[in-house]
Amino acid sequence: MPRRVSLYSLTFSLPLLIWQLLFFVFPLVFLVALSFWTVKNFAMRPDFDGVNWVTMYGRAVFWQAYGTTFALAASAAILTSVLAFPCSYAIAFKLSESARRWAIFLMVIPFFTSYLVRVYSWQIFLSDRGIINVVLGWVGLGPFGMLNTVGATMVGYMTLAFPLVVLLQLFSLVFIDRSLIEAAHNMRCGRLRTVFEVVIPSARVGLTIAALFCFILTFGDFVSPVYLGGGDPTTLSILITDTTKSGQQWPRAAVIALTMIATLLVVAFVTVRFAYKGRSK
């Protein structure tokens, strides 16, 4: 039988529907329409012309920026997930309930400050005369060029996503059935083997979603590639800025933005499908 929609449920779901329409559907529709507008004499004109799509997709710099952005975001998701797992594992299985609450509180504290401020603080550490090179100079090493590099960009990405990834992994690990771990130990399964054959498969959904969130955050990030990476190599977020500054080409920037949205939707769909693969409905 088809489920009847009651006035009560409709009333409480209405705010969510309005929010989705105002802040996602309408802007997305406008962005699609904007991508077909034309720019003449530095003025945008409503139109329905695919020249912006042909122009952007025909440029090598666009595909180079796309590949760079995807590779950096994927690398950040993998690296952050790998480095965050020992932290989340220790909090979930090694700390007491009280200590775990304090650890979660400490993980939330970085979100109290602006991401831009945290990135600027990394410039003090990574510059040629920064704190790290000064300390290395005391032992006769350096200076090493760390700022305006891909490595510095990755540091910024981890600054953005690491606390969130740890929290998402932690919330998945704490709900693992401890009897499965005890059974593995009773069968003389070592700690490391238990982690890879029991803990990680049991927390696969949470670990995968955490990596997905990291990819989403870093794929569209503008701050770290500019202020820590020096804008080289060019990412899609930087290309959007450069495109808007070049003759007010907002329609072409809309093409880049829509490509990014489509990529994130595809990645999210594939990742969620993998996360829930084989699970009972």
Image (cartoon, rainbow, N blue to C red):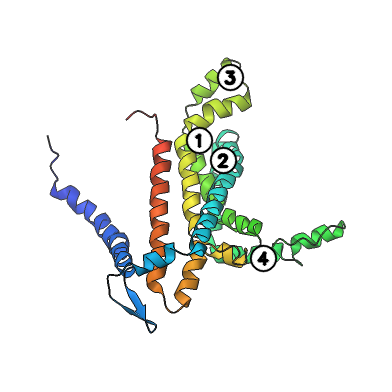
Q: Earlier in the sequence, mark 1 or mark 2?
A: 2
Badge nearest the viewer, 4 or 3: 4
Residue on which the image places disc 2 = 88
Q: Marks 2 and 4, how far apart in space? A: 28 Å
- Asked whether, in this view, residue 124 is left or right of residue 42, the answer is right
Q: CA distance from mark 1 to mark 4?
A: 34 Å
Q: In what element is the residue under mark 2?
A: helix
Which residue is more in the foreground, 64 or 116?
A: 64
Question: Which amino acid, mark 2?
Answer: Ser
Q: Position of residue 173 (x, y in %)?
A: 50, 35
Q: Amino acid at mark 3?
A: His
Find residue 2 and report its horizontal and vertical position in percent: 13, 38
Q: Amino acid at mark 1?
A: Leu
| Numbered tag placed on residue 185 in the rendering | 3
* Residue at horizontal 52 percent and vertical 47 percent from the top: 165
Q: CA distance from mark 2 to mark 3?
A: 21 Å
The mark nearer the N terminus, 2 or 4, is 2
